[in-house]
Amino acid sequence: MSSTLTHIALEKAIEQRHPILPGLRLHPVRGKRPCHSGWANASTVSPVGRAILARREHDGWACALRGSGAIVIDLDLHHENADGPHSWKQLVGADVPLPAAIGYTPGGGQHWWYRDPGDVGPHLGILPGVDVCGPVPGTQVVVTGPDRVLVITGTPFTRPPVALLDLLHARVAAAQSRPTTTVRLGDAATGARLRGLAKRVDEAVPGQRNTTLYWAACRAAEFAPREHAEAVLRAAAVRTGLTALEAVSTIASAYKTGAAADAPRVR
């Protein structure tokens, strides 16, 4: 199905209050930028979303992964010497479970949609050209838009391939067993600001821990190298009850986004 036809089909589904992928909340985007604030918690048929739809202020739709029940395997071709589709095929072999949907990006990459197994979190660079996009704050995946094609396979959301889960579980075990290292925090002002952010993370209540960590890492990205921020914020996050892997993944997501706390990671 062409990008234009996919976009029309998706909008018709939204108008009929029938999501094209059951359970996913979609928000309108222009390019890769959300059309309104609060996009991460937006409903497919929210008043704001429907108003933007009526005014034609958008050219696509995206899904906020947090709370979606889905993860997306991002197979990229942009990185040097990285062929995500080839790496994926080498990992899972020929008997890969069919995902609920496959998205094709303008750069030749692919998005494979699976059910979130709930115990692995997001991972960057698990293989050359392969990322796992998971339910961390500020993460969205563009579903349809210019030069994008979404293929609905007709299968329900299924768990990712066993080979992928085995690889991710091994990474979890390695991250949780890795000791916290001591890193020089540069000048005194930088260290003081990082410790202030860590205090905010320490004070986060259950249900807000990951969001607070993401906010703190975005703030840290404004003035500190990632290794300095990770040394301080990871320890604070683990004290609140997050796993080391969750902390590292969230900090990496914030630094990949950049310094703007309200800017989404986009795929």
Image (spheres, rainbow, N blue to C red):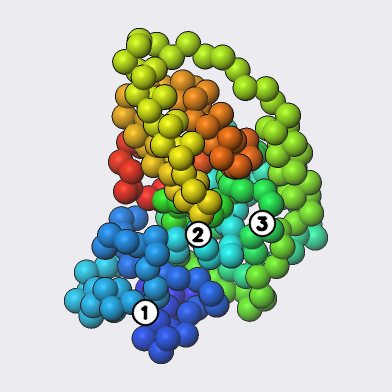
The residue under label 1 is: 45
On screen, residue 139 versus residue 119, left or right, reads: left
On screen, residue 8 versus residue 55, left or right, reads: right
Q: Residue, x 65% and y 70% (percent of image)? A: 157
| In-front residue for pair 43/6 | 43
Where residue 125 appears, x then y in whole percent?
59, 38
Q: Secondary structure at mark 3?
A: loop
Label 3 to label 1: alpha-carbon separation: 27 Å
The residue under label 3 is: 118
On screen, residue 226 versus residue 167, left or right, reads: left
Where residue 38 appears, x then y in whole percent?
32, 61
Label 1 to label 2: alpha-carbon separation: 17 Å
* Residue type, mark 2 in image: Leu
Q: Is residue 159 above or below residue 131?
A: below
* Residue type, mark 1 in image: Val
Query: How many numbered discs, if any?
Result: 3
Where residue 216 appears, x then y in whole percent?
40, 37
The answer to which of marks 1 and 2 sits earlier in the sequence is 1
Labels 2 and 3 touching (C-beta < 8 A): no
The residue under label 2 is: 65
Labels 3 and 1 touching (C-beta < 8 A): no
Point out the frontmost of discs 2 and 3: 3
